[in-house]
């Protein structure tokens, strides 16, 4: 079993979510402030694999990275792997504007964690299906949380962090990673 692992991210929100999940284990989680110009790809797994190789090369300790995206059906999966960039440029209001009058609001969050222990790279995926709300709701979370409603629910992730922790794509991929680390 792994006793200590590093999360290579500069995103304090992602690290906090991971810390909460790892807090239920006896595996120590550390943050590695990692600055990396990630590759452009339509594949979360390809981005995560390349990033974790770079992170391990720099840190030299068991490390993981997480890449995620919001995939909107009516927009052919856009913004997908470009979600962070699109959020910086358009924000939630821009996404809602693009979807004005669109009936199919189905969307999904996907996450891919890539873990490197010095010998091998393993990947773990998490998906959360849902839809895009008609307007922003809630003050919690970050990014697209105020406009994403998980399937079968009526609240956005930003309205209920408990809901996010129960269904989140990141939560699911972190659980897969933890199972792997414990074996």
Image: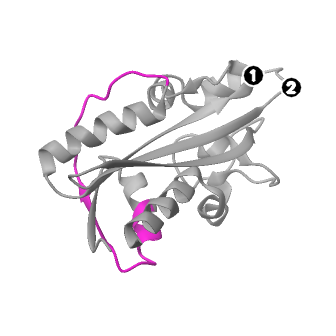
**Farthest residue toward the right?**
103
Q: Is residue 35 magenta?
A: yes
Instruction: Specify the color scheme.
Output: one colour
Question: In the figure, residue 108 lies in which quadrant?
Answer: top right
Q: Residue at x 22, y 44 (%)?
A: 55
Mark 1: give few (<14), some (14-19) or many (20+) Cα within 10 Å: some
Q: Which percent across, then down, holds residue 104?
A: 83, 27
Q: Residue at x 64, y 64 (%)?
A: 166
What quarter of the picture does the N terminus occupy?
A: bottom left
Q: Residue at x 13, y 44 (%)?
A: 58
Residue range of the region highlighted in magenta in the rendering: 18-42
In the image, taking residue 4 as reference, residue 105 lies left or right, namely right
Question: In the figure, residue 67 lies in which quadrant?
Answer: top left
Q: Residue at x 67, y 56 (%)?
A: 159
Label 1 sits on residue: 74
Q: Is residue 64 magenta?
A: no
Label 2 sits on residue: 103
Distance from the alpha carbon under mark 1 to that under mark 2: 9 Å
Numbered disc total: 2
SS of the residue under disc 1: helix
Tell me which secondary structure the magenta stretch mostly adopts: loop
């Amino acid at each position: 079993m792994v006793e200590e692992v590093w999360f290579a991210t500069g995103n304090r929100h992602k690290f906090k979510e991971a810390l909460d999940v790892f807090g239920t284990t006896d595996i120590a989680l550390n943050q590695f402030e990692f600055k990396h110009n990630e590759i452009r790809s339509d594949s979360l797994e390809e981005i995560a694999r390349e990033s974790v190789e770079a992170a391990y090369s720099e840190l030299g300790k068991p490390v993981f990275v997480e890449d995620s995206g919001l995939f909107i059906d009516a927009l052919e999966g856009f913004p997908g792997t470009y979600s962070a960039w699109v959020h910086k440029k358009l924000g939630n209001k821009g996404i809602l504007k693009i979807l004005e009058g669109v009936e199919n609001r189905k969307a999904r969050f996907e996450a891919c964690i890539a873990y490197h222990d010095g010998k091998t790279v393993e990947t773990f995926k998490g998906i959360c299906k849902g839809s895009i709300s008609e307007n922003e709701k809630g003050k919690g979370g970050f990014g697209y949380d105020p406009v994403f409603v998980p399937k079968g629910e009526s609240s956005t992730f930003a309205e209920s962090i408990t809901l996010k922790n129960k269904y989140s794509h990141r939560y699911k991929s972190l659980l897969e990673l933890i199972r792997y680390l414990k074996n």
